[in-house]
Image (cartoon, grey):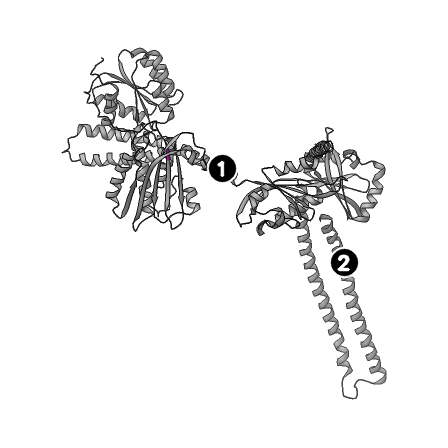
């Protein structure tokens, strides 16, 4: 292309002088002719007195018009020259721009480009040639083709050169020798071009190392099976048996793609049998995939290169689209002549579904981690606010003019705590304290509350009488149910029916789900509404945090996200099925206990407060400040530490005085778990109240299982803190 553009410029430069000479000749002939005619008429006028013709025409006037016509000719010539000059400039500009684009494309081509003169000297190479063979451009320009192509002897060059000049192009496979001596198989296409009177071979070489490996592997495989089948009288039966028993669909066609064999798996997946398709083309290709598919078939048939893992869609006999992965290879007869194609088709529909589920789970896990971290930090911030409000209220009488305003602020902070609780629920860090729960009781209680709020919704209960018990956080299960009730009610703005069912189930009924449930018994809750329903796109995002179909300001998008997190945090699973205009069904599976649950709550014991020394450990200065003041209000002597190392040092010195350690779970350098273990080594009977902006997650539960006395989630007020302390220190013992 580059040579053609340069040739076009040269041709234009050669033709321009020719056009000028031609135009000048026309003008000159016009002027000369006009002059001769003027002289002739002047002669007749002088010697014959022919100044007027018979009609009275004056010859002088006619003669005087000749210069006028000459001027017109000169003007026409000037116009032609200006037009040609403008066209020449524009053409040259476009040609030079095209040359720059072409040069850039060649320089940055992924294939190697070599330009050689008629003596096989290299006059140009691109960057791909340098990168592949290891030579610099300067080294290449001192070399000939024979230096990098050991399979091309010098004595054959002249014949090859003449053949290239005659045909204009050639194609061959060869090898290139790199600077370190490695031989690289290449596919070379040569093109003959002429520039400034000289001929060049513009050769494009493509590295085919991987293709050669595949071809060799295929040849090795073919030789292996040829040998195997040659030794067996039942070779054809063995071959057909292998194909017949394959789980993948197998099709054999001739080179015109006419079917000669289909396996039973093909019939099972797509519905057609051999009688319907023999001698015909496969009818299962969607219109949108035909061009791409035909291109692949042409390449395999022409070059014999196998094509693996072509993912596409194919129709079944019943016009259902199936996601498949197709591999195609060409096979030869006993003479080595191409005979037909072997097509292997794998149904990957289920794999794609699982892949989508895994990607979705990973995305939600990542968002959950982010949400949990945000909620933890926000809870620490609110701890300072709630603690200070609690301290102020502790000293104020209810009649104080600011008392009610402070109580309102406290309520707003608690509302913020509920929001972070939803975030922690989604992050699966929201299981507070598990205990045996009777799900029927929770369903009845929550539905009773819901009925009072949404009287336009008709509710129906179908509860199993012998339902298994579950071990769960009672408050969070209530949150799950109330969020799902509210979601159903929002889908029925003009009223409708809401049905809640409970029952026992096992992992076997979940076998066809996208997840892989643990073996055992489950309790199933189904929440069915007659609302507007959802499309597939909405269902795919319904559990994402902050996703909502409500208008701005009418929803946070955290309700169903927290439902998902809480259910997962309890080791359960959740499904949703829905159709536009036909309502939705949410199914929740929670791991069951070995027996039913009767008694749900125990009456709390009344314990008198006590005094003593408390060690408060937290890396947040605001939490330390407000926590010390709250404990001092209770009458405790308070020691504080801002990190694990400082806490251990204080406890080592004051362990006989310290009645209780309030320990933050998440701290830099030395976390709460390590500090707890070191405290137990110093004093095995130490009382430790674990504190965190996170809820009771697996890390906190592990510390509790190692002997930690209790857990409290930040932010907390004075009453909540005192209740936890009294749970841990029931005896009215005072240490001073």
Q: In this view, does 81 lie to the left or right of 491?
A: right
Label 1 vs 2, first from the N-terminus: 2
Q: Which mark is residue 15?
A: 2
The percent coordinates of residue 501 (x first, y second) are 32, 39
> Which of 607/720 is in front?
607
Is residue 594 one of those drawn in magenta? yes
Q: Position of residue 656 (x, y in %)?
A: 27, 11
Residue at x-position 73% and y-position 50%: 6
**Figure disc tally:** 2
Q: What stretch is highlighted in magenta?
A: 589-597
Q: Are marks 1 and 2 in contact (CB under 8 Å)?
A: no
Q: At which x and y percent is residue 500?
A: 32, 41
Quadrant in which residue 210 is drawn: top right
Give me the residue at 59% from left, 39% from top: 248
Cα–Cα gap, marks 1 and 2? 69 Å
Dot 1: few (<14), some (14–19), or many (≥20) neighbours within 10 Å? some
**Residue under pointer 1:** 354
Please name whichever residue, 470 or 666, is drawn nearer the observer in this view of the structure: 470
Q: What element carries label 1?
A: helix
Residue 688: in sight, yes or no? Answer: yes
SS of the residue under disc 2 = helix
Q: Which mark is residue 400?
A: none
Q: Quadrant of residue 70?
A: bottom right
Q: Quadrant of residue 670?
A: top left
Q: Nearer the viewer, residue 711 or 244?
A: 244
Magenta span: helix, strand or loop, mainly? loop
Q: Which of 538 and 67 is in front in this view?
A: 538
In the displayed structure, 370 sits above or below 639; it is below
**Which residue is located at x 69 percent, y 37 percent?**
236
């Amino acid at each position: 292309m580059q040579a053609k553009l340069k040739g076009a410029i040269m041709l234009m430069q050669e033709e321009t002088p020719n056009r000028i000479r031609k135009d000048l000749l026309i003008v000159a002939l016009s002027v000369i002719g006009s002059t001769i005619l003027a002289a002739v008429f002047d002669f007749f006028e002088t010697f014959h007195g022919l100044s007027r013709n018979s009609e009275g025409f004056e010859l002088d006037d006619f003669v005087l018009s000749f210069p006028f016509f000459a001027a017109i000719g000169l003007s026409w010539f000037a116009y032609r020259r200006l037009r040609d000059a403008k066209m020449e400039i524009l053409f040259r500009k476009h040609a030079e721009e095209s040359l720059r684009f072409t040069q850039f494309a060649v320089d940055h081509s992924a294939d190697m480009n070599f330009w050689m003169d008629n003596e096989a000297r290299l006059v140009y190479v691109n960057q791909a040639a340098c990168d592949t063979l290891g030579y610099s451009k300067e080294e290449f320009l001192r070399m000939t083709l024979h230096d990098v192509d050991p399979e091309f002897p010098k004595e054959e060059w002249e014949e090859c050169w003449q053949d290239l000049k005659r045909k204009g192009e050639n194609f061959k496979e060869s090898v290139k020798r790199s600077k370190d001596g490695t031989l690289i198989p290449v596919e070379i296409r040569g093109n003959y071009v002429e520039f400034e009177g000289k001929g060049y071979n513009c050769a494009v070489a493509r590295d085919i190392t991987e293709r050669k490996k595949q071809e060799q592997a295929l040849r090795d495989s073919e030789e292996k099976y040829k040998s195997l089948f040659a030794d067996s009288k039942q070779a054809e039966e063995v071959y057909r048996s292998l194909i017949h028993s394959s789980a993948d669909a197998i099709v054999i066609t001739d080179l015109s793609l006419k079917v000669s064999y289909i396996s039973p798996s093909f019939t099972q997946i797509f519905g057609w049998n051999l009688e319907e398709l023999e001698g015909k083309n496969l009818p299962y290709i969607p219109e949108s995939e035909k061009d791409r598919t035909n291109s692949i078939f042409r390449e395999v048939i022409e070059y014999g290169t196998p094509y693996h893992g072509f993912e596409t869609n194919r129709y079944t006999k019943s016009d259902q689209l199936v996601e498949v992965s197709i591999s195609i290879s060409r096979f030869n007869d006993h003479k080595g002549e191409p005979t037909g194609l072997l097509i292997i088709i794998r149904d990957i529909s289920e794999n794609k579904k699982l892949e989508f589920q895994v990607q979705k789970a990973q995305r939600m896990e990542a968002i959950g981690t982010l949400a949990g971290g945000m909620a933890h930090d926000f809870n620490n911030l609110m701890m300072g606010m709630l603690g200070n409000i609690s301290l102020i209220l502790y000293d104020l009488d209810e009649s104080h003019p600011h008392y009610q305003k402070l109580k309102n602020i406290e309520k707003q902070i608690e509302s913020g705590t509920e929001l972070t609780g939803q975030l922690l629920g989604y992050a699966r860090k929201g299981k507070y304290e598990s205990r045996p729960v009777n799900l029927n009781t929770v369903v009845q209680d929550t539905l009773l509350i819901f009925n009072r709020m949404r009287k336009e919704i008709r509710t129906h209960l179908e509860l199993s009488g012998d339902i298994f018990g579950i071990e769960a956080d009672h408050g969070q299960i209530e949150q799950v149910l109330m969020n799902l009730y509210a979601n159903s009610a929002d889908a029925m703005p003009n009223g409708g029916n809401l049905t809640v069912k409970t029952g026992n189930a096992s992992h076997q009924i979940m076998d066809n789900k996208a997840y892989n449930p643990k073996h055992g018994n489950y309790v199933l809750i189904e929440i069915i509404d007659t609302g507007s329903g959802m499309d597939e796109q909405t269902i795919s995002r319904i559990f994402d945090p902050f996703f909502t179909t409500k208008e701005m300001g009418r929803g946070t998008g955290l309700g169903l996200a927290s439902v998902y997190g809480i259910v997962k945090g309890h080791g359960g699973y959740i499904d949703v099925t829905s159709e536009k205009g036909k309502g939705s069904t949410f199914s929740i599976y929670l791991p069951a206990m070995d027996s039913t649950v009767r008694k749900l709550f125990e009456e709390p014991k009344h314990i008198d407060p006590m005094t003593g020394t408390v060690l408060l450990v937290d890396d947040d200065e605001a939490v330390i400040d407000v926590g010390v003041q709250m404990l001092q209000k209770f009458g405790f002597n308070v020691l504080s530490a801002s990190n694990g190392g400082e806490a251990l040092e204080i406890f080592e010195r004051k362990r006989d005085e310290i009645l209780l350690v309030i320990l933050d779970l998440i701290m830099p350098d030395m976390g709460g778990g390590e500090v707890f273990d070191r405290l137990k080594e110093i004093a095995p009977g130490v009382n430790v109240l674990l504190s965190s902006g996170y809820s009771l997650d697996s890390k906190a539960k592990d510390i509790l299982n190692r002997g930690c006395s209790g857990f409290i989630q930040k932010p907390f007020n004075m009453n909540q803190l005192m209740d936890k302390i009294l749970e841990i220190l029931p005896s009215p013992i005072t240490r001073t």
